[in-house]
Amino acid sequence: MPAFARKRIPTFAAFMSSGRTVAFHTLGCKLNFAETSTLARSLEEAGFARVRPEERPDVFVLNTCSVTENADKECRQWVRRFQRINPEGFIAVVGCYAQLKPQEIAAIPGVDLVLGANEKFDLAAHLERLEGKQDQGRAVFGAIKEVRSFVPGWNTGDRTRTFLKVQDGCDYFCSFCTIPLARGRSRSATIAETLAIVRGIASAGVREVVLTGVNTGDFGRMHGETFLDLVRELDKVQGIDRFRISSIEPNLCGDELIDLVAGSERFMPHFHMPLQSGSDAILERMRRRYDTALYARRVERIRERLPHACIGADVITGTPGENDQEFERTHAFLRDTAVDYLHVFTYSERANTTAVRMEDTVPTERRRERTHQLRILSTKLQRSFMERQLGSARMVLFERGDGEGAAMEGYTDNYVRVVAPYDASRVDQLSEVRLGRINGDGLVEGTFTMASPSRYVVDEFAMIV
């Protein structure tokens, strides 16, 4: 029986008048979470009430990721889960995987609608147009080269922290990556448009904004502007206590940007720079736009200007050509370079990428073993970084509490996760905390240095918060 007949989808007007409900589930990166919030706002404006998936919504929206080899498996699992919760529910799938494999997803039993990269932000309108169609699943997508517009995104409902999408797409075409195929060319809003959004976020009482994108540092190129220009202007915005850069390519993280963050009142001493490999031969095969010497210089500059900064890196294990010697070069580079934590990914073959056609593939088990080794190294690096912070007093932005007498958690400016006794007056507030021991959950236990939250000058940063 056709999906629309089976599920008896009413008219779009009936959706709105009867108070229809929608639930979202997001796979993947912070960028996807920001975009899910944008989709949610658009459906709320169209008359839908957002609920949790377990509340049997009328419409399920799955925002997918294409980075891992499990994209298809995860998509199918969530579709089945939605069907178990509400067999009559309407299921729409969007996101990177939806652009890459729209017809395959549309063929999954239970999927009613698949929207590509250029169509997903018109989800409400597509629901209206699809009324009465007699399809099992309908895929609406265009060629990725036709995606030109930039749609900003930011999450709402959390006064502590917002992830703000400032850039989308990528022009780099690294040999292992499908992102340009899923999201298109690099694009962004203007600085003026971005500032207007940030001022609106500030008016909602949000304390921290995390700048995110596919290639965040490539912001503004289509408008003759730069990411450095954006950071300089954001640093002047009143009402936001903290800005963080979620990730930036080392070739785009120049000395001027590092120096600006070092002297900033609002940008946090936290850098996440993708490395991917500590072997120059592998970096060349990956078509990365830097070598290990440049990466090391960036880390050294950050350490010179911000000794207390937290530096993270992305690494991929098992790309074609990574023999034992090349992997050991990566392991040694990470041991010798002053990074503080790793996000480690296991290489998986992705259709239509250059790497999938390369020779010298690495056996799957060896890839996984190398990932395990680097994750052990990451644990040691992160533990060492946290131990160096113990005894210091740092500002913490506390996010939540479970109730009177329970614990509350938050991040220091330099990205140390801190737990402290619950105090309702400190939720969504900055408080100075003395960092004590590391507990069994890997969190640093903190004690408050003042009786109540206040604004004042912080230790060696001389940063007015």
Image (cartoon, rainbow, N blue to C red):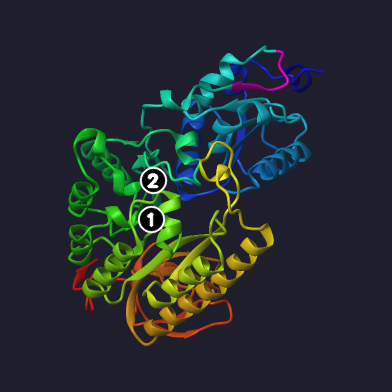
Q: CB atoms at circles 2 and 1 under 8 Å apart?
A: yes
Q: Quick check: 231 left or right of 274?
A: left
Q: Is residue 175 above or below residue 298?
A: above
Mark 2 sits on what residue?
213
Mark 1 sits on what residue?
246
Position in image of residue 25 (x %, y %): 60, 43
Query: For mark 1, does the 10 Å Cα neighbourhood hold few (<14), some (14 to 19), or many (20 or more) residues?
Result: some
Question: Helix or strand or loop: what does disc 2 sit on?
Answer: loop
Q: Quick check: 121 left or right of 293?
A: right
Q: Residue at x 38, y 39 (%)?
A: 168
Q: Earlier in the sequence, mark 2 or mark 1?
A: 2
Position in image of residue 227 (x %, y %): 24, 47
Which segment is the magenta one?
134-139
Q: Inspect the magenta stretch and tell me whether residue 229 lies in it.
A: no
Question: In this orientation, which residue lies closer to the viewer: 177 or 167?
Answer: 177
* Magenta stretch prevailing secondary structure: loop
Query: Quarter holding the N terminus?
Result: top right
